[in-house]
Image (tube, rainbow, N blue to C red):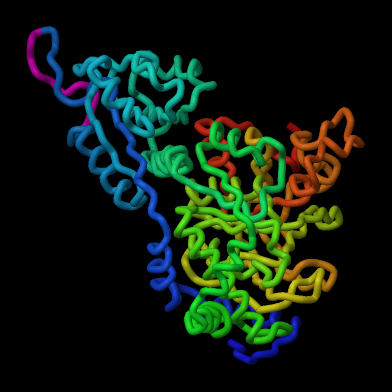
Amino acid sequence: MPTLDKLNRRAFLGTGAAASAALAGPPPGRSPLLAERSEFPQLRPARIYKLFIGRSGATTNAAGKQVQYLTWGQDEVTRMNDYLAALEKQLGDITFVGGETIPPTDVAQIAARAAEADGLLLIWLSGHGGDYQTLEKLNFGIDKPAVSFFQPFSGHGWMWHQQWKNRKVILLSTTDWKELDEAVALLRVPALMRQSRILAINGPRGTKASCSPDQVKQKLGADLVTIPNEQVLALAKSIDPKATEAEALNYWIKPAIGILEPSRDEIIDSARYYLAVKQLMIREKAQAVCSVACMGTPRACLTFSKLNDLGFVGACEGDIDSTLTMLLFAHAFRSPGFITDPVVDESKNALVQFHCTSFTQRPDGSRMPFLIRNQTDSGGGVALQVQWQVGEPVTMAKLVNLDTMLAVPGKITETGSSPLACRTQFTQTVRDARHLFLHWGGGAIVNPSNPGDLSQYAGAMPMLHRAVFYGDHMRGIRRLGDIIGYKVIEEDIAS
């Protein structure tokens, strides 16, 4: 793997496969990254109240004899409790409470205790006896997120689940217990969002609803706070020069495939800005930051990349809609996002994604190969050219107006290095590029009946930016919408 300070574009692209192999597996820096994350504010685990509904195991027949009722082997409740205990340990930020079975427990005895939890998990057992009106009787399912896990052969109550379609409930009917992994992970999101704080440096930009702290709080539970950039710059002056140099050297300079335009001092200055933002986030107990001042001196590209590597959110150009999207994905899927300025290429039936900052951590914890560059538009500052992994599935998404999730799934087909685009570039497949080109935004941002009215755009940011995540998250996006309360528009296909 090349370690030269200077490396041209062709060499970078040519060494991608070798660099990927060299970086495969948990890198030496992974443990320090986890340790650094622990320095930030830690959120309280979500409390999920579990309830079993129906009959399973021994029951009494008409002759008064104890028999096994439509079940098998080990008691189903015991096995499910074991499964959920393992899931609790795996996720690390949930706690299961409760565990009563209805019947014989009366719903009224549970409602007050369950009302204190963050979410509700209803597990229908493999025998008749479950009451399909349980959620109604609990009298808090209307405004508390829930998962209803119905297993085939758990009675006939499945027919009535349709009455809950418009509630904050993920409805499952499956024999696969692994379906609970994603559903429970999504169930914790509202609780984590209510504990989250977003710092908007010099104020947010985006759709009007997303720029309103009151509406963000009401809809998603998060706090949106404006911070002047002068406050960050003042903090930067107080950062220990030795700590700054160590940060730049260990996290950026040494792991980089190469360095083209920026000087060592410029990279160190960018690292100083990160340490100032980190200090501010710890002090303000924040999980996300976006900045209108990110194109200033120093630029914030490395800052946002590092925050996203850590599992937090750093978003450029004050884009609050993308910030909220990335925060939801961080809580729901533990997946960092890359804000891009995408363009449609009909000849390839694809989107070209590009921007001057990207996270570097793959889902497996290894780092993607990257060059340290300057910022394309201005020819100054410090930015990253990151080589995303060809062949991997990705999801492009953006929550706009707090009520609509725009989403396009695809797969990475190639990376690029065009001098006409921002530094990190890759091509993503779409299902219908022509439809996407003519229906960009899905009518959720611009009024389709009057697209020429520029006031409908709420600024350029909502139409321009999207966030891209590794993995196919389309099912998770829809299910998260069930409990958060947003609709999903797939921009590249007709609805």
**Magenta segment:** 63-72
Residue found at x 38% / y 32%: 119
Picture quarter with the N terminus: bottom right
User: Relative to 30, is 413 on the left or the right?
Assistant: right
The spot of residue 421 in percent (x, y) is: 81, 67
Q: Quarter-wise, where is residue 214 in the image?
A: top right
269 and 310: which is toward the camera: 269
Q: Is residue 66 magenta?
A: yes
The spot of residue 331 in percent (x, y) is: 48, 48
Q: Quarter-wise, where is residue 46 in the image?
A: top left
* Residue 409 visible in this rendered orientation of the protein: no
With respect to residue 465, does 404 lie above or below? above
With respect to residue 347, does 399 lie above or below? above
264 and 241: which is toward the camera: 241
With respect to residue 349, does 217 lie above or below? above
User: Relative to 489, is 119 on the left or the right?
Assistant: left
Residue found at x 60% / y 76%: 369
Residue found at x 54% / y 32%: 218
Picture quarter with the C terminus: top right
Looking at the image, the residue that sits furthest to the bottom is 4
Q: How many marks?
A: 0
User: Is the magenta region chiefly helix, strand or loop?
Assistant: loop
The spot of residue 165 in percent (x, y) is: 52, 22
Q: Quarter-wise, where is residue 453 in the image?
A: top right
The spot of residue 457 in percent (x, y) is: 81, 40
Residue found at x 39% / y 64%: 39
With respect to residue 264, does 297 lie above or below? above
* Residue 251 visible in this rendered orientation of the protein: yes
Looking at the image, the residue that sits furthest to the top is 62
Q: Is residue 43 magenta?
A: no
304 and 346: which is toward the camera: 304
